[in-house]
Image (cartoon, helix red, strand yellow):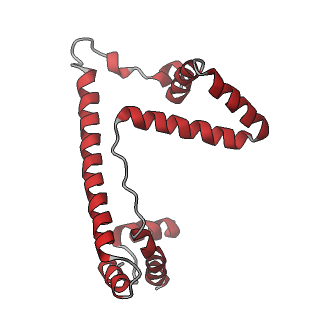
Amino acid sequence: MGWVEGILEFLKEGPKGGKLDINTLLRVSLDSGIIDEKKAIAEVNGLVKWQIARKRWHQNKTRQKMASEGPEDLLPGIHTFSFGDFGLDEQDLAEFELDEEDEDSGSENEEQDELEAVDPIAAERKKRMRERERLRSRAGEPKKPEIDELKKLHPGFLSMLRSVLAE
């Protein structure tokens, strides 16, 4: 119980050794020439714009979902049923719909069968990646910008994190 309380206290209060100062990490990295200031600022601004667009996309998607449900007073109780009430799993149903779509693409199925015979894990990964890409392209989710310069901050961030957590 004490261990769980310690985790909850850490999540609530933060580390006892202090807080991570990202501004200091950025200044030290800029002064030592690890990162280029203009590229780093452009990447941060790109990430901020992406996060704002992603938030708007999520809000619009939620609004559309709420609007498509319609008023509940037309048919009372209609929204109280779920797939689980009938012993069905929503992911299984989505997979069933995917199987029907996959029947149309014969050459992909042949490649999938050959890959499954050689490496079933790689085949499953490839299948899941295709599914994620299909869902993403249909949903219109904003694409995350590429970051290269900010990744150079990773070693400094890890050492700073270790020192804060070690205390």
| Left or right: residue 124 compared with residue 23 | right
| Left or right: residue 20 compared with residue 62 | right
Identify which residue is drawn at 35% across, 86% down.
Answer: 28
Q: How many marks?
A: 0
Q: Which residue is at the far right?
A: 118
In the image, 88 versus 153, the foreground residue is 153
Identify which residue is drawn at 42% across, 75% down.
Answer: 153
Q: Quadrant of residue 101?
A: top right
- Residue 33 point in image, percent of width and height: 38, 84
Q: Quadrant of residue 145?
A: bottom left
Kindly tell me whether residue 134 is visible in this rendering.
yes
Q: Quadrant of residue 82?
A: top left
- Residue 68 point in image, percent of width and height: 26, 22
Kindly tell me whether residue 87 is visible in this rendering.
no
Identify which residue is drawn at 45% across, 78% down.
Answer: 161
- Residue 94 point in image, percent of width and height: 51, 26
Q: Is residue 88 above or below residue 162?
A: above
- Residue 107 point in image, percent of width and height: 65, 25
